[in-house]
Amino acid sequence: MVRLSRQHAGKTVRLRLLVVLVCSIWSLWSTEALAVRPFVTDDARIVYKGQLGTETYGGTTVVKGGSPAYEMRTLEGLGITDRFELTAGGFGFTYHDHQVRPLDLLIQPKYVLHSSLGAIPSVSVAAAMLYPMSGNRQHWDGYSMVHVSWFLFTPNADIDPYDNDLAIHLNFGTKNRYDAGPATFQSKFYWAAGFEVITFTRELRLLGEVFNGDPFGFEEKFPAFQTGLRWYKAANTQLDLVFRGVRNTTEDVRLAAGGGGLSEEWNYTIQVGFRYLIDVFR
């Protein structure tokens, strides 16, 4: 009876995850024309002044020898000025082996040093702190980063200067961890490279990224990749379908992904993401 109850609870949680994601997309659907940003790694643009960008995504992760894990997260970024953006959130949770755990809370200010279209790149800087909502107050993670981006082949800048045929971005910085137990600080180099290019229509884009682990996960490291498709229903409304792979090179990463055993296995994630921009003040 206990096993049947747990199986039923697992199916119920997965169904609720799907319903919440679908309802979020349905309720926010719009046809206004404004810009949105790329997926997991970041580029040098910010949301426009006075606008709030909300990012909601959920997916499932599988690894050889382990049970699947499910995750849902939401982030919000507010354009305070033309150059300064504040992102906060991370409100979400993971579900694995009949356990639900909250995700860490993110606070990230971001500032554009130089904005450009064409061969001269745009440059921004960002720093972030992850507040441990899960209850483990021993590890405090964060990162600092420089974003370098090229926005190329803009057909009509009067509509949206970021509506490019090709966008390329590079990230450089550090991922940091403060361990409150022995009171030690660790830092390691972080990098990422990605692109977004139009396909046979302007509304459908191809994405590709290689990165040194997720910036939200201190233990993750190279090799890591993601690729997928992005559909712009409108310039301020986009839907992503992404396939992601990360090598299980540490015990922390294996446990987070639901992996078992001590071998270095890959874990793979299929994720659906939704982004939307709304006016707050102009």
Image (spheres, rainbow, N blue to C red):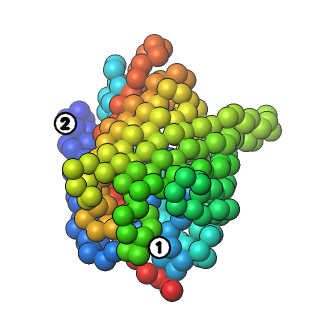
Count every numbered label the image shows and give the total: 2
What residue occupies the far top of the structure in this picture?
263
Q: Is residue 68 visible to us here?
A: yes
Q: Is residue 225 above or below residue 93?
A: above
Residue 124 position within the rendered picture, expressed as x and y whole percent measured from the top left: 63, 57
| 121 left or right of 100 in image | right
Question: For mark 1, does the 10 Å Cα neighbourhood hold few (<14), some (14 to 19), or many (20 or more) residues?
Answer: many
> Which residue is found at the position 61% from the left and 76% from the top?
81
Q: Position of residue 173 (x, y in %)?
A: 67, 43
Disc 1 target residue: 52
Judging depth in this view, the residue of 92 and 181 nearest the camera is: 92
Whether tag 2 and tag 1 are in contact, CB under 8 A, the answer is no
**Residue at (69, 34) in percent of width and height:** 188
Could you tell me the amino acid type at mark 1? Leu
For label 2, the SS is helix
Element class at badge 1: strand
Query: Which comes before the other along the chain, label 2 or label 1?
Result: 2
Cα distance in 3D space between marks 2 and 1: 44 Å
90, 195: nearer the viewer: 195
- Residue flagged by tag 2: what amino acid is it? Leu
Q: Residue at x 50, y 68 (%)?
A: 47
Residue drawn at (56%, 44%), measured in percent from left and top? 170
Along the horizontal axis of the image, is 271 left or right of 190?
Answer: left
| Residue 277 in view of the camera | no
Q: Residue 10's x, y, as percent? A: 26, 42
The numbered mark at residue 10 is none
Q: Is residue 258 left or right of residue 141?
A: left
Residue 84's place in the image compared with 238, above or below, is below
Q: Position of residue 232 (x, y in %)?
A: 28, 61
In the picture, the disc for residue 4 is: 2
The quadrant holding residue 79 is bottom right
